[in-house]
């Protein structure tokens, strides 16, 4: 039985590519084989149950963080446009094992952000923005969102099982 909450997003369908039904995916995964290796995948609209698809081929657009995928059953531009905004998802239990100090995006979202020796709650992690330097988006308890570099010097401690991380921000970072 497929359950709605047993899936994690690894990318989002952001555009149609050409006239033959290819789609553009903005990845949220550091594992390129998820977008290039043919085989079974799933797409999900909002929080509905995922739909199984078959990935025929996928390629990275040179110089961009976008993949172009060809999937069975999507054979023209209008059928590709119909799934823009859908997520490419995988079962949560199919995540690869990581080394120490590596984290899954899915595990970071929702963590409490704490600060100082007393580990005072200051907000919650709401997103991880990938780029040259990864940034955690943290919604502070007063409602403002801030971006914090995801580096050991600023985030020295992460406790996934206890659902919190410690922030040691330089002066002014949380006021930006």
Image (spheres, helix red, strand yellow):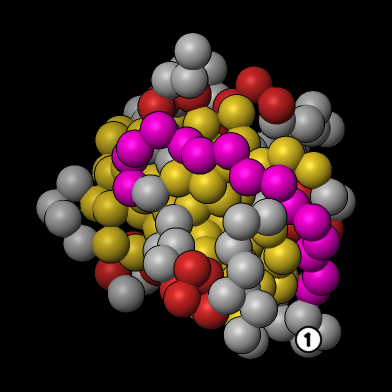
In depth, the one of 71 and 86 nearer the eye is: 71
Compare residues 139 and 59 and report the one nearer the observer.
Answer: 59
Q: Is residue 170 above or below residue 90?
A: below
Residue plotted at (71% across, 66% down) = 69
The spot of residue 35 in percent (x, y) is 75, 56
Question: Residue 105, position in %: x, y?
Answer: 57, 44
Q: Is residue 14 visible?
A: no
Residue pictured at 68% horizontal, 58% vertical: 71
> What segment carries the magenta color?
46-60
Question: Horizontal and vertical percent for residue 175?
Answer: 28, 69
- Give the side of residue 66 with respect to residue 84, left or right: right
The residue lying at 52 percent from left, 47 percent from top is 43
Element at label 1: loop
Q: Is residue 18 left or right of residue 121?
A: right
Residue occupying the far top of the picture: 1
Question: How many residues crowd mark 1 within 10 Å: few (<14), some (14–19), many (20+)?
Answer: few
Label 1: which residue? 63
Q: Is residue 112 visible?
A: yes
Is residue 148 shown above or below 67? Answer: above
Q: Is residue 45 within the magenta segment?
A: no
């Amino acid at each position: 039985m497929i359950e709605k909450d047993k899936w994690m997003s690894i990318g989002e369908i952001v555009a149609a590519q050409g006239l033959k039904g290819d789609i553009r995916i903005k990845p949220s995964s550091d594992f390129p084989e998820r977008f290039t290796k043919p085989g079974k995948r799933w797409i999900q609209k909002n929080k509905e149950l995922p739909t199984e698809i078959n990935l025929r081929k996928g390629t990275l657009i040179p110089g961009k963080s976008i993949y172009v995928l060809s999937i069975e059953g999507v054979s023209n531009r209008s059928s590709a446009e119909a799934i823009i905004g859908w997520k490419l998802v995988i079962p949560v239990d199919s995540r690869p094992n990581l080394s120490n100090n590596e984290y899954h995006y899915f595990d970071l979202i929702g963590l409490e952000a704490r600060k100082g020796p007393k580990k005072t709650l200051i907000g919650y992690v709401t997103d991880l923005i990938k780029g040259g330097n990864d940034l955690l988006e943290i919604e502070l308890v007063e409602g403002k969102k801030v971006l914090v570099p995801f580096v050991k010097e600023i985030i020295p401690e992460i406790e996934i099982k206890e659902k919190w991380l410690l922030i040691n921000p330089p002066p002014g970072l949380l006021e930006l």
